[in-house]
Image (cartoon, rainbow, N blue to C red):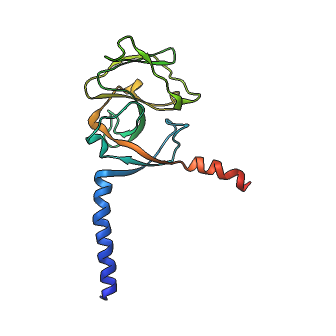
Amino acid sequence: MSKKYFLEILEIILILSFLLPIRIFLFEPFFVKGSSMEPNYYSFDYLIVDKISYHFTDPQRGDVVVFHPPFDNKVYYIKRIIGLPGERVVIKDSKIFIYSPENPQGKELKEPYLQEHYTSGSKDIALGKDEYFVLGDNREISSDSRSWGPVKRERIIGKVIFHLSFKKIIDEIKPLIF
């Protein structure tokens, strides 16, 4: 075995020993599957999820998170956090109201990221100390906390910090090609 070959193998081992812990403990790539988050996230969009921040801070309303749903430890879902621990979430007449110590009379949630979508159904749920109410942005078809309840904190993998949409890229270059 030549010295050059040995150094190349050593370089690969060093790179992997550096990158593997980052991949396991800090950041994880995901691909979106399904249309429950359209028009903000499409199937096959590439995501990088920050797995470490929630060890130091709490998830916030509006965060887009990847998590294991309450009914399956093997699959991953992507949804948006709507309700925080200790709050009461009420869905009525296509609107969401959040009741909390800061807003005991309730406050309507404004969601500029929804565009044309509306929140169907009727729900009134009080969240426990480690529970989050999550919804897909494509409310008409999303399977989310309206049907299977809140998500426990320990089931949240992390927050989406990078998003690459292949659909949006294709939509932008299509006029240039045709």
| Residue 73 pos. (x, y %) | 30, 40
Quadrant hosting residue 176:
bottom right
Please identify the residue farthest to the front as the structure is shown. Answer: 102
Q: Is residue 24 above or below residue 94?
A: below
Please tell me which residue lies in front, 71 or 128.
Answer: 128
| Residue 29 pos. (x, y %) | 40, 51
Q: Is residue 13 above or below residue 62?
A: below
| Residue 126 pos. (x, y %) | 32, 18
> Left or right: 31 with respect to 3?
right
| Residue 58 pos. (x, y %) | 30, 35
Q: Is residue 1 above or below residue 167?
A: below
At x 53%, y 29%, the residue is: 112
At x 40%, y 35%, the residue is: 63
Quarter of the rendering occupied by the C terminus: bottom right
> Left or right: 40 with respect to 176?
left
Quarter of the rendering occupied by the N terminus: bottom left
Q: Is residue 119 above or below residue 167?
A: above
Quadrant hosting residue 22:
bottom left
Quadrant hosting residue 9:
bottom left
Count the marks: how many? 0
Please identify the residue farthest to the right as the structure is shown. Answer: 178
